Amino acid sequence: MSASRVPDSMRELWSTASAATKGPVIASGAIVSADGHDVVAHDPVTGAQLWSYARRNRDLCGAIGFIDDAVAVYRDARGCVVAPLNPNSQPRVDCTLKSGAVGASVLAVLETCPQDPTLRLTLQKPTPKDNDKPEELYSAVLPGVERGSAAKVLAVADTRSAVYLPGTRNELVVFDDRGTRVGATVLPGEIAQTNAAAQAGDVITWWTGNQVLVLSASDLSYRFVLPTTKRPLGPGTNMAGELVVPVEGGIDVFNMTTGEFRKSIAVQRDPADEKSPVISAVVGNTVVEQRGSRIFALG
């Protein structure tokens, strides 16, 4: 059941180790932790174990949530790098994926390829006719975007992709599925290497390290910067139709449509946990935060 309102106060309900996740994993209403060999689903309020899965002879590489499922990847003799599949069917070989995002119509990736002097942006169909052969819509190098830069695909919406391009312009650029620039926003200040984006209802929030930008989830157009009361620690999430954003010493609440500040909620965190990104999610009346290698449930 979804929350009917954002509470005025929160306390820690429980926490557990989850070093194999980068953000909260929610599956069918449960909070899923992944650590060592074990994947465990927890009751959001009590933390009680609902189910578990483990491979005792394998360490976890990572785990994510996908629709109502939790997907875990285990290390094998090759480590955590996937073996090349049908390399003769690929338009380029030996490329390294830097970042990516997928939508219903477009899969957008930034990659480094041995033959390219700069980063390459590739847009392709997420569900090609032949699963073994990618169907590219567009692929080209990005002039001036160095291979080792912090460029990043932030989000995909319909046929559009939002990409952060550092450099002299320091821009957030929106491309259509043919690689045409259909929007650009010049960004003030530095963008942290640990920047993160997340969808929250009808908007996408992008935590840059010092502020939280809000984009439309329908066309990725820039809307506004959230007026946080203190330094934000991560992107926002949706609770009862409002944006909740982790900030130093608490959580700030905003109107989803206008960005108007609503209230602050005090949250006690270890100061060390506020030195790295805090990625949050909501399940029912519980706010879940990933702080470093642990997840914390608040309610």
Image: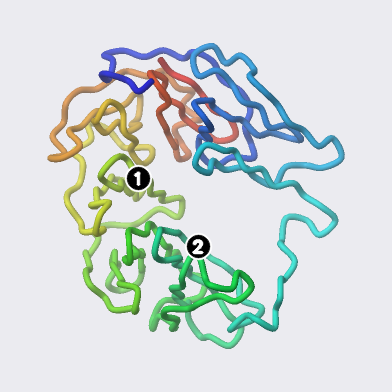
In front: mark 2 or mark 1? 1
Which residue is at a point 69% across and 47% down the rendered structure image? 73
In the image, residue 92 above or below residue 44: below
Relative to 9, say whether 227 is above or below. Answer: below
Q: Residue at x 45, y 40 (%)?
A: 277
Q: Position of residue 264 (x, y in %)?
A: 24, 22
Tell me the quadrant of the picture where the N terminus can be found: top left
The answer to which quarter of the image holds residue 140 is bottom left
CA neighbours of label 1 inside 10 A, class few (<14), some (14 to 19), many (20+): some
Q: Secondary structure at mark 1?
A: strand
Contact, mark 2 vs mark 1 (Cβ under 8 Å):
no
Residue labelled with disc 1: 199
Badge 2, how many Cα within 10 Å: few under 14, some, many 20+? some
Q: Is residue 173 left or right of residue 110?
A: left
In the image, 233 versus 53, the foreground residue is 53
Q: Give the quadrant of the C terminus.
A: top left
- Seen from this angle, which residue lies furthest front? 129
- Give the residue displayed 53% in from the left and 32% down from the top: 27
Q: On screen, 168 above or below 228?
A: below
Residue for badge 2: 99
Q: Which mark is residue 64?
A: none
The amino acid type of the residue labelled 1 equals Gln
x, y percentage for residue 215? 24, 52
Report the front residue among 64 and 196. Answer: 64
- Which residue occupies 24% across, 30% down? 241
Q: What kind of residue is marked 2?
A: Ser
Disc nearer the start of the sequence (2/1): 2
Secondary structure beneath disc 2?
strand
Residue 42 falls left or right of residue 217: right
